[in-house]
Image (cartoon, grey):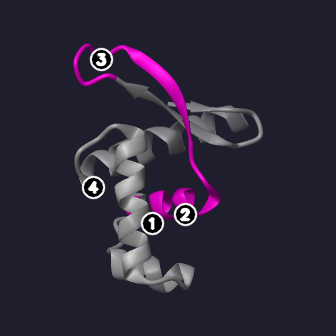
Amino acid sequence: MLVDLNGDMTARKTSRDNGTPADRVHLTPTQRKVLDGVHSGRLNKQIAFDLGIAEATVKAHMTILMRKLNVRNRTQVAIIAEMMNGQREAARG
């Protein structure tokens, strides 16, 4: 995972075949908010309420996040969110 100095969160995608780094992944502001909600242990319904969007929209964002981060489930998304959070804090100093 990478975080640039502007706080823009990006993740390194890895190939499932060989685990090598691939392209950087850009997350939209809404995807970051959904990621933060997952990191906080919130349900899709709770994230939707917090963001003022439909639960189906949160599910769509989760699908896109899993694809972008090259993971298969919500737990893996939460783990990556934790790693990104740690890097963001380390970048602050």
Tell me which segment is drawn in magenta.
Answer: 15-38
The numbered mark, 3 or 2, whose residue comes first in the sequence reads 3
Mark 1 neighbour class, 10 Å CA radius: few under 14, some 14 to 19, many 20 or more = many
Looking at the image, is mark 3 or mark 2 nearer the viewer? 3
Three-letter code for the amino acid on which mark 1 is drawn: Gly
Using the numbered discs, state the Cα–Cα distance from disc 1 to disc 2 in whole angstroms. Answer: 6 Å
Q: Which residue is rendered at x = 35% and y = 82% of the image? A: 45
Magenta region includes residue 53: no
Q: Which residue has dot 3 on it?
A: 19
The numbered mark, 4 or 2, whose residue comes first in the sequence reads 2
Using the numbered discs, state the Cα–Cα distance from disc 4 to disc 1 in whole angstroms. Answer: 11 Å
Q: How many marks?
A: 4
Q: Which residue has dot 2 on it?
A: 33
Q: Which residue has dot 4 on it?
A: 74
Three-letter code for the amino acid on which mark 2 is drawn: Lys
Three-letter code for the amino acid on which mark 4 is drawn: Arg
Q: Position of residue 19 (x, y in %)?
A: 29, 17
Q: Position of residue 56 (x, y in %)?
A: 37, 78
**Quadrant housing the C terminus:** top right
Q: Which residue has dot 1 on it?
A: 37
Using the numbered discs, state the Cα–Cα distance from disc 3 to disc 1 in whole angstroms. Answer: 27 Å
